[in-house]
Image (spheres, coloured by chain):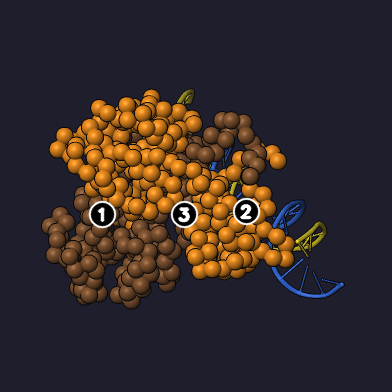
Chain colours: A brown, B orange, C yellow, D blue
Amino acid sequence: MDEKEISQAVIGRLPRYFRYLGELKDEGVERISSQDLSALMKVTASQIRQDFNNFGGFGQQGYGYNVEYLYDEIGKILGLDRRHKFVIIGAGNLGRALGNYTNFERRGFIFRGMFDSNPELVGSQVRGIGVMPMEELERFIQENDIDIAVLAIPKASAVPVAERLVKTGIRAIWNFAHVDLNVPEGIQVENVHLSDSLMKLSYNISRYQMEDRHLGEQKRD
Amino acid sequence: MDEKEISQAVIGRLPRYFRYLGELKDEGVERISSQDLSALMKVTASQIRQDFNNFGGFGQQGYGYNVEYLYDEIGKILGLDRRHKFVIIGAGNLGRALGNYTNFERRGFIFRGMFDSNPELVGSQVRGIGVMPMEELERFIQENDIDIAVLAIPKASAVPVAERLVKTGIRAIWNFAHVDLNVPEGIQVENVHLSDSLMKLSYNISRYQMEDRHLGEQKRD
DNA sequence: TAGATTGTTAATCGATTAACAATC
DNA sequence: TAGATTGTTAATCGATTAACAATC
């Protein structure tokens, strides 16, 4: 009953549960036990039960979990029963790729506008949405009640643009720029730092090669 | 001296250290203490010292850390002193965006080839690299000693393609498809699940709105 | 009712933070 | 030498796993 804060570790696992449950639902599976789901997803059954219990009991003793019900409930927890309107800032390759990704729409994320500072890109279209000049950013966000701004611009411009977004009253920023944004509490930022991800991959490649050669300790020369 | 395994929690923080140290270096800062770095990065000084000590002492008592040396050492740990050749599979919007992203090159990741199953895309160019048909995948990877395959294809085709890659002897897969890949131990997989990231953002928006309205407990109707 | 499986408490494990002796 | 700051050990905190009573 208490307003216990759910840890980000748990939140981070919810989309994966949601994905597996969606697949099970599509396959016509009606119910599943934590043990079976555990085998499928390769996490412990204990963790599954703990995770779900953060939000109250979704299951039934002796039965397991109803797949469709659980799927819907996790969807609601993730806020996927609501519509989130977003704009993309930056009409470069990445911005256009994100704009063309229609799957977001199925989860309630509605592509509403696109902006770029380059006059040559202004006026071009992405999925029927015309690219607008940066000057129109504030007006458009306010008039259209935009929830999320997707930052697909270089890091140098990301910081000042984020400040403008904050002033405009944006709720959330999905940040693809390789820089940390400092925004006031209450504005949500989710970073996708592609090069960080690639560096982790690089580390794991190197580490494995070292292990392979039984070089526990590597002298630097 | 022991081959103590470094936790992925630590590895996950290295790219961010690397980024901040690179910026300090560019600004001409010569040395920094864990305390100053702590203030800058908003993590505890204790964590910084612990993290660096996983790899042996990079600092000096009474002095702090030499920025350039630390930057170089973290780069080496991350394997950025080596070259990693990669191919992109999937010449759609995302694949092309990744191919056009020249910053990867600066970190030693070399774009070498691109593949697509769609004959209409085969032959088109991305940064001077021609898109090849999927039939040439195995031959090309082996002849060119490719380390990393970037999967920018729909999830349905991602699983069989990953199997082909594994057979071909690829070292690592950077997976943008929304599916979990099962590969043998020793092949590194790093997932970038964009919709998972967006769902986390969605959760945090909803959560903040609930807190705002002091609705700790929300009845479902 | 008996069997299955959750919900939940307790035990363990790992990661983070605090503290301080070593040392530059 | 005195001051600063690391390297490292110990304490704390949080997350995961194990266990089992509750209950469908």
Give the class, few, some or many, for how many residues have Cα within 10 Å of label 1's Cα (few <14, many ≥20): many
Residue A206 x, y percent position in the rendering: 52, 39
Q: Within 10 angstroms of label 2, few (less than 14), some, or many (20 or more) residues?
A: some
Q: Can residue B154 be seen?
A: no
Q: Residue at x 62, y 61 (%)?
A: B66
Of mark 3 and mark 1, the one earlier in the sequence is 3
Q: Are marks 3 and 2 in contact (CB under 8 Å)?
A: no
In the rendered structure, the answer to whether residue A153 lies left or right of residue D16 reads: left
The vertical placement of A17 against B162, above or below, is below
Would you place residue B67 above or below residue B84 in this image? below
Q: Which mark is residue B52?
A: 2
Q: CA distance from mark 3 to mark 1?
A: 31 Å
Determine which quarter of the picture holds residue A217.
Answer: top right
* Residue at 36% in and 28% down: B143
Q: CA distance from mark 1 to mark 2?
A: 36 Å
Q: Mark 3 highlights which residue? A: A8
Q: Which residue type carries mark 1?
A: Asn
Which residue corresponds to the image point at 35% horizontal and 58% vertical from the top-left? A176
Q: Nearer the viewer, mark 3 or mark 2?
A: 2
Q: Dividing the image into 4 quarters, which one contains the N terminus of chain B?
A: top right
Report helix, strand or loop for mark 2: helix
Residue A117 pos. (x, y %): 24, 69
Amino acid type assigned to the residue bearing label 3 in the image: Gln
Q: Which one is in front, A49 or A2?
A: A49
| Amino acid on which the number 2 mark rests in the picture | Phe
Q: Which residue is mark 1?
A: A93
